[in-house]
Image (cartoon, rainbow, N blue to C red):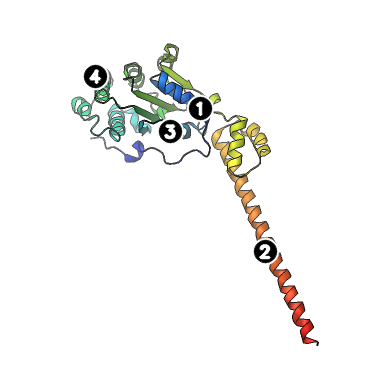
Amino acid sequence: MVQVIPEKITPPVELPRVSRDRLLTTLGESLEGCNSTIIHGRAGTGKTMLATDFARRSGRRAAWYKLDAPDSELPAFLRHLCAAVATVRPAFGERLLERLGEQCGIDDVPLAVEYFVHELLDSNEPLLVVIDDLHLVYDAEWMVPFFRRLLPLLPPEVHVMLLGRSLPPTPLWRMRSKQTLCVLDESALAFTLAEARRLFASYGLPAERANAALVETRGRAAVLDSQARSAGVAEEAARMAATRGARASGRLSLRLIKGGRKSRLGTT
């Protein structure tokens, strides 16, 4: 029996240093107008941070599932996906897993989707399902049939957000042309100058420091934040050193004044 790993269905705790309002607005529009969203970009482009921030702000219960390589096996994927939804909808997936068993394969995909959607329909409470690192299962033979069948059948109150380092195989992301799927790519994830300046300001750094860093990093979230953090730490260290130096200088001046007074008293 596949054992559920709790860490894989636990939403990230860390939030971004600054919120990306323009991207949050796009995701909000997708939430209202589409049934699914794909966010894709290389490692460090801010996909997970953005999704985490949006999930906290969406006003919906959010189920989170972070895949790893063993999830390319359909039974492992289904068990963790159901367990993720069950964190916000208790007992979700029990009927699906009981009916399909532990040996399901690609021929069972239509039934798996039917059972999954049927259980989603048991509640009309708005739900956001985030599936992170989906690129790790792109080569699984069930992947395209599963999502190609699932996404068009999602109930109106359920939205699925897929995160990966590249676009899913063609038949899936082409749903974009039917206006049921919103796609945010790496170019959209790149920081703008205004966002970079707000990030640097959050570390107590002047806006002009962000200009050069943005060009150097090409707006890549993780690298830009690393530069801002390092510069902020260096600035704070310099301020603390200057403060300690000023205090030490003041104490030395005070000792010299006191010493001078004692000397004059001793010669009278």
Label 2, label 1: how far apart the Cα atoms are: 46 Å
Callout 2 secondary element: helix
Q: Quadrant of the N terminus?
A: top left
- Say which of marks 2 and 4 sits in front: 2
Q: Amino acid at mark 1?
A: Leu
Residue located 24% across and 19% down the image? 111
- Say which of marks 4 and 1 sits in front: 1
**Up/down of 104 relative to 197, above or below:** above
Which residue is disc 4 drawn over? 111
Q: How packed is label 1: few (under 14 Cα within 10 Å), some, or many (20 or more)?
A: some
Looking at marks 3 and 4 on the same chain, the residue that comes earlier in the sequence is marked by 3
Which residue is disc 2 drawn over? 247
Label 1, label 3: how far apart the Cα atoms are: 12 Å
Looking at marks 3 and 2 on the same chain, the residue that comes earlier in the sequence is marked by 3
Residue 118 is left or right of residue 144, and the answer is left
Q: Quadrant of the C terminus?
A: bottom right
- Say which of marks 1 and 3 sits in front: 3
Task: Evaluate whether residue 227 shows in this view.
Answer: no
Looking at marks 1 and 3 on the same chain, the residue that comes earlier in the sequence is marked by 1
Q: Are marks 3 and 2 in contact (CB under 8 Å)?
A: no
Q: Quadrant of residue 99?
A: top left
Residue 257 is left or right of residue 201, and the answer is right
Which residue is disc 1 drawn over? 23
Q: Amino acid at mark 3?
A: Arg
Which residue is disc 3 drawn over? 57
Q: Nearer the viewer, residue 185 or 138?
A: 185
Q: Are marks 4 and 1 in contact (CB under 8 Å)?
A: no
Q: Are marks 2 and 1 in contact (CB under 8 Å)?
A: no
Residue 121 locus on image (x, y percent) = 26, 22
